[in-house]
Image (cartoon, rainbow, N blue to C red):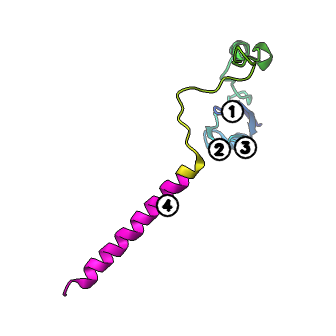
Amino acid sequence: MPIEFRCTGCRAKLHVPSRWAETSIACPKCSSRVMVPSASPEGVAKRFEDRSVEKSIESLLVSPQKFEKTSVQSEQKGEPVAAKGQVSFPRIWIYLQGGLIFAVACLGFAHGAWIFSSSPM
């Protein structure tokens, strides 16, 4: 007789053979490890959740239709307002900084090689 239970991660309904009772399996939907409950003496799996609990959980879920689509509009032109407090740089500054770091690294390497090559061993 198969054991029916729900995944603790994604709440998917799982059906496994009774020989897998009290073992750990991977959920096929979310791949989380789930412990298979033991089979009840009558051969029917015990439900660990109550239907009233499931209904109360479903009532807490909010559908996207209940929310209004809102966005901040500027008062003058009706265009979206730009975020304040952000500093923007032209893209060229990023490339210049990368080039500067590369140049310093190359000069440091050349200077180190020059110092060690001129010292007597």
Residue that label 3 marks: 28
User: Considering the numbered disc 2 on the image, is that residue within a helix, a strand or a loop?
Assistant: strand
What type is the residue that disc 2 sits on?
A: Ile
Residue that label 1 marks: 10
Give residue 33's position: percent from left, percent from top: 61, 41
Q: Nearer the viewer, mark 1 or mark 4?
A: 4
80 vs 56, nearest the viewer: 80
Name the residue rendered at 60%, 27% in the picture: 83
Residue that label 4 marks: 99
User: Do tag 3 and tag 4 residues touch (Cβ < 8 Å)?
Assistant: no
Mark 1 nearby-residue class (10 Å; few <14, some 14–19, many ≥20): few
Q: Nearer the viewer, mark 2 or mark 3?
A: 3
The first of marks 3 and 4 along the sequence is 3
- For residue 55, which quarter of the picture? top right
- For residue 26, which quarter of the picture? top right
Residue at mark 3 to residue at mark 4: CA–CA distance? 49 Å
**Vertical placement of 49 versus 113: above or below?**
above
49 vs 44, nearest the viewer: 49
Q: Is residue 98 left or right of residue 110?
A: right
User: Do tag 4 and tag 2 residues touch (Cβ < 8 Å)?
Assistant: no
**Vertical placement of 93 versus 53: above or below?**
below
Mark 4 nearby-residue class (10 Å; few <14, some 14–19, many ≥20): few
Q: Residue furthest front?
A: 76
Give residue 80's position: percent from left, percent from top: 71, 23
